[in-house]
Amino acid sequence: MHGREECEAVVTDNGEIGGRPGGVDGRLRAVVGLAQGMAAAHTPQESVGAAAEAARRALDGGFAAISVWERARGRLRVLVNVGELMAGEEPLPEDESYPVHDFPEIAEFLHEHWAAGGEPHAWVETADGVRPGAAPPGRQGAAASGSWGRVAALRRRGRGSCVVAPIVLHGRAWGELYVARAAGRPVFDRDDADFATVLASVTAAGLAQTERLEEARRLAFTDPLTGLGNRRAVDIRLDEALEAYHADGTVVSLVVCDLNGLKRVNDTLGHAVGDRLLERFGSLLSLCGAMLPGALVARLGGDEFCLLGVGPPADEVVRVADELCRRAAELEMGEGVACGIASTGDPIGPVPSARRLFRLADAAQYRAKAARSLKPVVAGRDGGTEDSVIRLADTSAAHPPERRRFRGRR
């Protein structure tokens, strides 16, 4: 084992840590670098990747991985692999997973060690089956023999040792940080395991922050009552869809729905019952929207909802809207739904912007509402560009109907 002075980390001009950061300053820089790397990531996947790479460098490993414990499926699923990859290892594996019974420490750690008041702690495994230092939590009687699954994996992939650190999130075992060295490299020791414990703790803090940010992003694009998308989500997706339409002719269809009878329910039965009606219709809209691959369903506000289809033919969208109207008519308390549809797959004229498509769908829905139609009204299907719906949408640009001004981003 080298002295601490000889193991001091080398920090490059771009801030990366090279060599084994055995000194206090080097390891402190490694911890800070890991936290900063996770904080700078834009997605959960990038955050996990940054943590794995930082831990690999900090522990002078040739390979590192982060896995999540999926309790319901009884497996450790690998989220990311970094460093020297062997056969069967991908940087972002789609479905690399291992039964927990082959790597039981993660579960034993929780049930046997924490129950006794212990703290999360990493351990070392070697390809010869001899575990340096203390046994992992939950395997106190097996200090000299490593986990069969890990020993076999090390041998199979030509690695000499690994350090495994449980990642604990919200008081529960979330998964693990795994760092390995090739056969012939110095074997990890107890100091390395202690440092890996710290790195796993910092990783857990980064994951918690990522979760909070993801939840904030989710709430920013989600209607809190129904769990559907909100108007912001629709605006962004519709802009992207119309870019595809202008680029290659991708069919973009917008269904705007107005739930009938909500005011009566609110006035006579109370807003709590009205909210339940909104939730039930939202579930019905989600169910019907699932018939169209990639469709977005959303609540625009109040009693107004929409379905955005990108790709499917206009006739398929109309068929789904027909089904939605039929099922909505059967909802208790409600009075059905008025649906209007505008699709670039129909003769509706130029659609230069999301606002134009919204106005057309809104005008069609207005016609359906006024006529108490049991079926959706489709812009452009009653006279092409001379369709009364299209004329209404065009007229409303300057003179909105009294019921409301048609929607559309300015």
Image: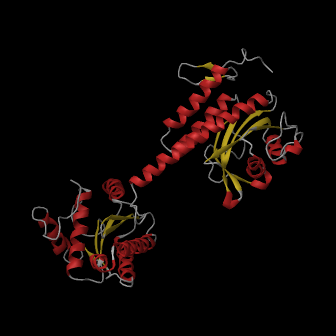
**Residue ID at (65%, 45%):** 168
* Along the viewing direction, whichever of 344 and 33 lies nearer the viewer: 33
Left or right, 351 with reference to 305? left
Instruction: State the image quarter where residue 29 is shown.
Output: top right
**Residue ID at (50%, 38%):** 41
In this view, which residue lies farthest toward the front? 117
Q: Which image quadrant: the N terminus?
A: top right
In this view, which residue lies farthest toward the top? 5
Q: Is 214 situated above or below 278? A: above
Instruction: State the image quarter where residue 136 is shown.
Output: top right
Q: Is 167 situated above or below 273? A: above
Q: What percent of the width, then of the height, locates residue 378?
A: 26, 74
Q: What percent of the width, then of the height, locates residue 396?
A: 13, 66
Instruction: State the image quarter where residue 238 is shown.
Output: bottom left
Residue 252 visible in image = no
Q: What percent of the width, then of the height, locates residue 92?
A: 60, 46
**Residue ID at (84%, 38%):** 127
| Count of numbered marks | 0
